[in-house]
Image (cartoon, helix red, strand yellow):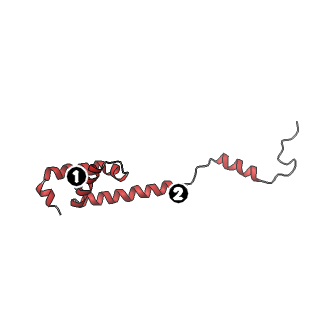
Amino acid sequence: MMRAALLHPLRFRRDHGFTRTQASAYLDGELGPDDRGRIESHTHMCPPCARFMAGLGRTVSALGQLRSTETPRVSVSEGVLARLRDEPHIDGAGAPPPV
Ligand SMILES: [Zn+2]
């Protein structure tokens, strides 16, 4: 598993750093096929990077779920106004006193 690291230590270290710095872009699908292949072959040989990518992937998807379930922000005054509009009106009760 770590044979490539022993055979090509410099390349392994470069790919290791590349994987860490480009992990987010990789998960977002922003990398070209060459860079994707470089990261994929490195994570197959490097258990720490495989764990790093898996953890980052879980974090990214959890964040995506948070965003999609986020309730729309309605300000208090909008909510109060909506309730006032929906309340049944009794003639004269809600009208300002005549001047
Ligand atoms: Zn690595």
Q: Closest to the observer: 43 or 90?
A: 43
Label 2: state its secondary structure: helix
| Residue farthest toward the bottom in the current orientation of the protein | 1
- Kind of residue sitting beneath label 2: Thr
Residue drawn at x 36%, y 51% as measured from the top left: 29
Q: Which is nearer the eye, 7 or 88? A: 7
Is residue 22 depicted above or below 59 in this figure?
Answer: above
Vertical arrangement, residue 41 with respect to residue 18, above or below: below
**In the structure shown, which secondary structural element does the residue marked by tag 1 occupy?**
helix
Bin the neighbour count of mark 2 within 10 Å (Cα to Cα): few under 14, some 14-19, many 20 and up: few
Rendering quarter of residue 56? bottom left
Q: CA distance from mark 2 to mark 1?
A: 35 Å
Residues 72 and 99: in front is 72
Q: Which mark is residue 16?
A: 1
Q: Position of residue 34 (x, y in %)?
A: 26, 49
Q: Which mark is residue 29?
A: none
> Splitting the image into 4 quarters, where does residue 5 fall?
bottom left
Q: Quadrant of the N terminus?
A: bottom left
First in sequence: mark 2 vs mark 1? 1
**Horizontal side of residue 39 vs 68, given as left or right:** left
Residue farthest top in this picture: 99
Q: Quadrant of ligand 1?
A: bottom left
Q: Is residue 68 left or right of residue 47?
A: right
Q: Residues within 10 Å of mark 1 (few under 14, many from 20)?
A: many
Look at label 1 and name its amino acid.
Answer: His
The answer to whether 62 appears left or right of 69 in the picture is left
Q: Residue at x 80, y 54 (%)?
A: 88
Image point 31% across, 57% down: which residue?
53
Residue occupied by mark 2: 69
Q: Is mark 1 within 8 Å of ligand 1?
A: yes
Q: Disc count in the image?
A: 2
Query: Which residue does the image show at 29% across and 52% down from the upper left?
Result: 36
